[in-house]
Amino acid sequence: MPKDGGIGASTKRREDIRFLTGRGVYTDDLNLHGQTFAVFCRSTVAHGKIVSIDTSATEAMPGVLAVFTGEDFKDVGGNPAGWLINSRDGTPMREPKRPVLAHGKVRHVGDAYAAVVAETYAQAKDAAEQLAADTVIDELPAIVDMKAAVADPSNRVHDEIPDNLCFDWGWIEDNRAAVDEVFKSAPHVTTLELVNNRLVPNAMEPRASIGEYFPGTGDYKLTTTSQNPHLTRLLIAAFVMGIPENKLQVVAPDVGGGFGSKIYHYGEEAVVLAAAKKLKRPVRWTAERSESFLSDAHGRDHVTKIELACEKDGTFLAFRTETLANVGAYLSNFSTATPTFLHGTLMAGPYKVPKVYVNVKTVFTNTAPVDAYRGAGRPEATFSLERVIDKMCRELGLDQFEVRRKNFITPDMYPYTTPVGLVYDTGNYHATLDKALEMTDLAGFEARAAEAKSRGKLRGLGLSTWIEACGIAPSNLVGVLGSRVGLYDAATVRVNATGNISVMTGAHSHGQGHETVFAQIVAEKLGVDANSVEIVHGDTAKIPFGMGSYGSRSLAVCGSAIDRAMGKIIAKGKKIAAHMLEAAEGDIEFKDGTFSVAGTDKAKTFGEIAFSAYVPHNYPLETLEPGLEETAFYDPGNFTYPAGAYLCEVEVDPDTGKVQVVAFHCADDFGNIMNPLIVEGQVHGGVGQGIGQALCENTSYDENGQLTSASFMDYAMPRADDVPFYNVDYSCQTPCTHNPLGVKGCGEAGAIGSPPAVVNAVIDALHRGGYDHVTHIDMPVSPARVWAAMQKH
Amino acid sequence: MTKVTLTVNGRSMSGEAEGRTLLVSFLREELGLTGTHVGCDTSQCGACVVHVDGKAVKSCTVLAQDVNGASVTTIEGMANEDGSLGVVQQAFQDHHGLQCGFCTPGMVMSSAALLAENPKPTEAEIRHYLEGNICRCTGYHNIVKAVLAASGQDVSALGVAAE
Amino acid sequence: MYNFDFVKPATLDEAVAALGGEDAQPLSGGQTLLPSMKQRLNAPGVLISLTGIAALKGVKLEGRTLVIGAATPHAVVATEAASVYPALAALAGGIGDPAVRNRGTIGGSLANNDPSACYPAAALGSGATIVTNTREIAADDFFTGMFETALEQGEIITAVKFPVPEKAAYLKFQQPASRFALTGAYVAKYQDGVRVAITGASEGGVFRWTEAEEALNRSFTAEALNGLSLPAEGMMGDLHGTPAYRAHLCAVMTRRAVTAAG
């Protein structure tokens, strides 16, 4: 057991104290002197031409201070996509401008075309209603269905894009012909068409932003619900508003969950800044949940045909997929990377499949933008693979466990280069599968199924063996792949004169517990009490730079940057110790917080070194600078590759079609573990969201582009009684080989691995109940869908 | 505007409310108690749960004037007198029953209401009782575990606890 | 929400007088009304809270009739009706969630007559009498369509009289998001016959399934319902279930309610 709250300890989260006592400070909790309130006018039609907006009556209403329309922002930049993807024929993707406020056309229900700022929220709300009444929008036919969008070139989301296609991407295009050849001669081919359902992220804290402008200095401040304030600043500065970065402070205080939806820069952030400058007063906006449903970036939304070519014994020969990926009405910041490099590159799974070809056509529709949501592309890849493998096993009558084992990459094969461009550094997929089976009590399953049957329920068991690439990196690779930015991260470790430590990290914690875990790592490495370490995040004025938290990157990338900065601190401390102890620098050892001269009892504590660093008297200033503060930038050498095996048991009520998850076992390999308590929590949360995707969550647009699941009354969020206790294990550890902590990341695992395990379990239950005509049910596997599938004899 | 006076966490507090002022807005904006959160506009998510005269209510669906004179307990009033975490709060920390913290005030208030009604609830009773509180982070495992622990039940089989 | 004037009378007479004013609406818990007002779908000029009227609260047994004050919260019914009319208490204890049950009232629910609400099924399934400030209305005459009742403008429900059956049960299949009834079946066996009320399913709101009642009058067993089904026509269809699915659930829930009633 680790001691003193260092690495590996299940340290209590320090941030919990403020959250549990109502003292957290989320954006909407701020109450600023002179604040004003913004309310946005949002399109009620999916597609329309803005004919006129008459602001005169609105401007005359009580309390109204300013009205903004798309016209006010037509000369500033657009909100860009972060990744440039080329089509198979080499042509670059189509990137329509995403304006701050819709201009000329509205392109989805919820598309903001105007904003009203008033003295009170109620006045702004009333005024926005007036402005909407004074706006004329000619409705155009809505483009909702992806297949229709591509097939009908006459109706366009963006006038300049004739077929509503952003790009037609092949991965790896050069392998296409060879893959096709495999399918022509394969002994068996299993084909599955499936939908990866669109999800509304629904972080419990709705988005909120407050803009401030300080006329005395010309400085701006944006307080916003962001997972990465530096990226938001960069986008506003370099692409949208042109505000110099040194004049713009972006602060993301306590943030109530993100799951991807708060990675991105949104137009509301630009509007509150522009309004604050115009009014010289703080301007605040907080989304109502109804607005969140319409305007947050959604997730997933793929329609995929996947084919598996194999031998009759289940040995994989090739995978081939064709996917339509919905990006919605505009490109959000990561929306082009998600269906491509976060999806196609994972299409080999943990398997030694020799050939893979992935085709993705990304389609504009009159729906809310779609972007990365917990897992981002990797859940889509995993779902397609694990569902088609399950179907193949049923078709050929093969044991699903043996088929996985037969095809797993084996531990002697690392580093392993996949046919879709990744190099897995390490792993042990047999070990996690064996562990999951041990946790499941496979031998007892038939008895459990019989007992369920005595209660009229059909019990089923579903497996998913998943892998992901996270800690997205390295910068040179992502640059080649089309990313407009490198994906390194930065940290500053500042040892204060009295020995306590401030760590400035580019990661942002919105539930992950960085304030606790990063302090554990610092305490362990520097041999100090964790309580003397403060983790500072979420403020561009305090932190050198950072790319924020998403893609399970915080520990692997930002944690490594902290580790590197600590290495510099220790090196500097040795110099100081050598000077103080009148020894050669090479003779100084650092252990457990003490600098000592090797082979002697001469030593200085960490605190003594720190104090000396700031109050030097006789330093050799040419070779030893005062101070003890180091900044490091860390660019990972590779992605990390967490992997695992998930087994789900469900019970299906054949009378109603209702599915209840009754057991869920997770055996994961996350490499080294920093805080087991937090790792378990991350897996629980991911699995909960995965069960939500698999069974409950249905984002539904009707043919007119109206969101029919636009509130918690119709969008089924998983509740406490929808899920079981999860059985979580992370003892199979193959530490990452290329980062200093040996960590892989655990934030997205549950959401990636669980949906196919749930759906496979439902199919298993139905087959066991005699409904073997059911080969697939699209998510969410709702009671109505299960019942309908059972009826089709 | 009408003057509304409440006993909040044992203290008499007053402020002005319109007819439409919701209890949650009154607490957050008029009394400055921002621990109670708003997570939806359809009375589903439960982030706003407080106790009014000892009963859990969704403060986003109660008019401030309708509870004029009532005794209200919010998350800010759940700690012990010495400032240490109360039993339910402490169990949530010990068992990692919160991540982003946004739903947490409502979860704690609902859990406390449950334990007041039912001091030793089963897992199923807890899950059912928390039906009106949505959490997006935890998958509910550690919330249910924390409530079991707060009621003095053994949770050692349900994963690690904080050291 | 648009603004309005709020009044909270202490007596029924004051409430009735206030309701005579222009744009006045009663508020009886508000667990449905307030969300609809937040969406600006409803904009009363004056809102009259009924929950301060002591005479409208409470659960009491009068002979074999359980009388529930209209402003009694679901949570109180769940507790206080449990020994006398357990099926009704269980239904009240399953509405919404605990916080909703502490505010929402029986009168508010019945007056709103949401097609997916639980209480209309209990009232119709029990052959209850809805008592107002001016008259008594039989449940069979009270529910006149989706969100529609026999109540006149300004008329206030004061109490609901439930004849206590020999046995009864309510089985609800929850809509996965809202947790309202996707379909709920209330079955009650009285000396003079069985009543079956279905909520959540029909475009016309709560209704009695007379064929099921006849079958159960012959034999109060789940098997007696074998072969009985309702047509999909006229059932609601939405994201959560087609009309055919709802029609199917009506039969499933009714069978289960009969079994549960014992």
Image (cartoon, coloured by chain):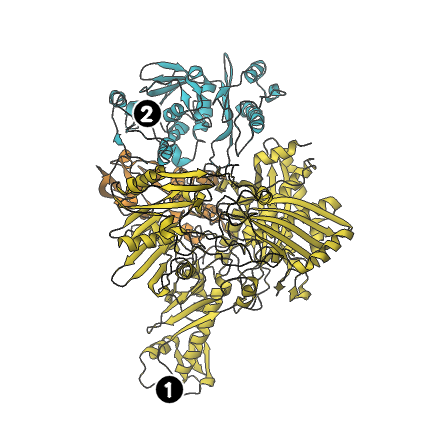
Chain colours: A yellow, B orange, C cyan
Residue C201, image x, y percentages? 51, 26
Location of residue A473 (image quadrant)? bottom right
Residue A649 picture quarter: top right
Give the side of residue A485 with respect to residue A532, left or right. Answer: right
Q: Distance between the residues labelled 1 and 2?
A: 86 Å
Which numbered disc covers residue C75?
none
Front residue of this view, candidates A649 and A495: A495
Q: Is mark 2 on a helix, strand or loop?
A: loop
Q: Is mark 1 on a helix, strand or loop?
A: loop
Q: Which mark is residue C57?
A: 2
Q: In front: A656, or A124?
A: A124
Contact (Cβ within 8 Å) of mark 1 with mark 2: no
Q: Which chain carries label 1?
A: A
* Label total for image: 2
Tell me residue A576's x, y (percent).
Answer: 39, 82
Q: What residue type is labelled 1?
A: Glu
Res B79 seen here: no
Check the residue under mark 2 and report the chain it is in: C
Mark 1, Cα crowd under 10 Å, few <14 / some 14-19 / many 20+, is few
In the depicted structure, whether residue A226 falls above or below residue C29: below
Residue C114 position in % (x across, y down): 43, 26
Local packing at callout 2 (Cα closer than 10 Å; few below 14, some 14-19, many 20+) is many
From the top left corner, tell me how far across and down residue B99 is, in percent. 44, 52
Decide: is C115 above or below B108.
Answer: above
Residue type (three-letter) at the residue carrying disc 2: Lys
Residue corresponding to mark 1: A622
Relative vertical location of residue A670 with respect to residue A130 in this rendering, above or below = below
User: Residue A416, can we see it?
Assistant: yes
Q: In which quarter of the image is the C terminus of chain A?
A: top right
Mark 1 vs mark 2: in front: 1
